[in-house]
Image (cartoon, rainbow, N blue to C red):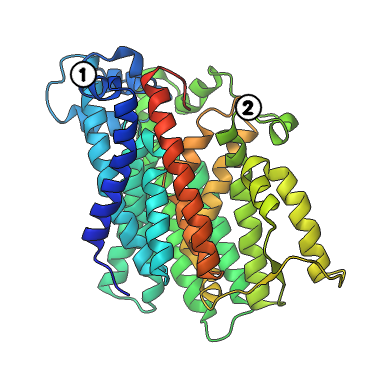
Amino acid sequence: MKFNIFLMSLLIILFSIFFIAIAIVINPHILSSFFSSSPSKLFYDVEHYSNLAINPTCNAFYPLWPWLINRLGKLGNADIAALCFRVFGSLLSLISIPLFLWLLKKNIKSYRVTILTAAIYAISPLSVFRMIGYTEAIFSVLSLFFLIALSDLKKISKISFKLLFIFACIFIFSFFLSLTRPFLLQAVAASILAFLSTLIINKFQKGVSFSTILRLYGIATFLICLGALAGYCVYGFYCLSIRGDFLAPFHDQKAWGKQLGFYPQLFFVPLTYADFISIYLPAIATITAWLVSISTNIKKLTFVIPKFWQWILLFAYPPAFLAFYSLDFNKANFLNKSIKSKEIYLTQSANSLSSSYLFWFCIYFALIHSIIIVFSDPKLTSLRRFIFGTPYFFVVIAYISQCFSSRKVCKLLLWILGISGIWLVQYWLDYANGVWIG
């Protein structure tokens, strides 16, 4: 089966608008506030970006997004600027949907997984941040171009103009992403870990040139790190010139109460449900990815289908899911004990997961975000939108989903899609009522 990206994007966009329309019917104030030029209570962080668009300065908020809005012309005041952020953010959010479909179509063999994952990305509850003026909109679009460039590396093994162009794109998008919001630490850690993971797995694969991987992904890793560093340096030297502090954006975050520390209660007592699963799902996905890689390259493992109540635990209280499922997995693989759960087999697509630099970068990018916030912010500020408001973790979902039986996985994705739609309505209602949503 083939599908037209434009047509499928249009259907997914209409699908997401349907849930937003439900929220508007429940509370018409959403629509009037969105297009009003003075909805001050709905600013949240957009208030800071709006002020930066009018009067550029150095603080914890990064400059690219307000600079672009400032280029639109005379904004007049912060209210008009906030309206521009919302309108153009919404347009970029819509643009990101066909880009996301394009990225998945190039890398995911299952069309059903591609379509369902794209739909989940489009109506994720945290997609609200891509439409209310936050940096999630422009960050997602730039990230998708960046990831598309990374995915094209696997098709080239020789030096050519196309390869040089891809390398240039990787550097440029890494540079701009680092000017959009905190990206440097996450990108450096994720790219290095992705490179090392690809090299380690390659040791156990046949028919893959080690020197090719070392050359292509080694250069890509260097360019990602260099681009991210160069992007921050542009802002850092600007901060140095006007505030005398090259690391001012980091120091400003300390004023919000952020500091390195260990907060064990966060792993067991959720502050909010969305933040709680944002801590665990990237870690669970990383563990699953390594188990799949081990099973396809080193030693065949038995994956058991979680029981119905375990699926509930996965999304309701992840630490309990980890405990119970780990026990079943251990019995099936190492204790030679029979269990009632049925075995689930890996598909042929699982072979490509472990050698995908794109996949490993996305999974580590989400994981590093989670680790940084968990160990620096006891309030978990912004964690949920960093994980579920941008494309990286949804790429991970698509890659892992195609490793297992599509029929069973698609049922799970459909359940997630339905819950996401309901939750998206609630987020829009909370937003209109001035409730803090992350």
Residue 312 in the image: state x and y as whole percent. Answer: 65, 47
Residue 362 in the image: state x and y as whole percent. Answer: 49, 54
Q: Quadrant of the N terminus?
A: bottom left
Q: For the residue labelled by badge 2, is the local secondary structure a helix, a strand or a loop? A: loop
Res 75 seen here: yes
How many numbered markers are drawn? 2
- 392 and 142: which one is in front? 392
Furthest-bottom residue in view?
A: 207
Decide: is 430 above or below 290.
above
318 left or right of 359?
right
The amino acid at mark 1 is Ser
Residue 87 in the image: state x and y as whole percent. Answer: 22, 31
78 left or right of 378?
left
Q: Which mark is residue 210?
A: none
Quadrant of the rendered image containing residue 37: top left
Q: For the residue labelled by badge 1, is the local secondary structure a helix, a strand or a loop? A: loop
Q: Residues within 10 Å of mark 1 (few under 14, many from 20)?
A: some
The amino acid at mark 2 is Leu
Decide: is 306 above or below 349.
above
- 339 and 180: which one is in front? 339
Q: Residue at x 25, y 28 (%)?
A: 85
Question: Which residue lies under the disc numbered 2?
Answer: 271
141 left or right of 392?
left
Q: Residues within 10 Å of mark 2 (few under 14, many from 20)?
A: some
**N-term-proximal mark, 1 vs 2:** 1
Residue 425 in the image: state x and y as whole percent. Answer: 40, 33
Q: Residue at x 53, y 78 (%)?
A: 348
Question: Which residue lies under the disc numbered 1?
Answer: 36
Furthest-left residue in view?
A: 73
Decide: is 83 above or below 393.
above
Q: Residue at x 37, y 49 (%)?
A: 143
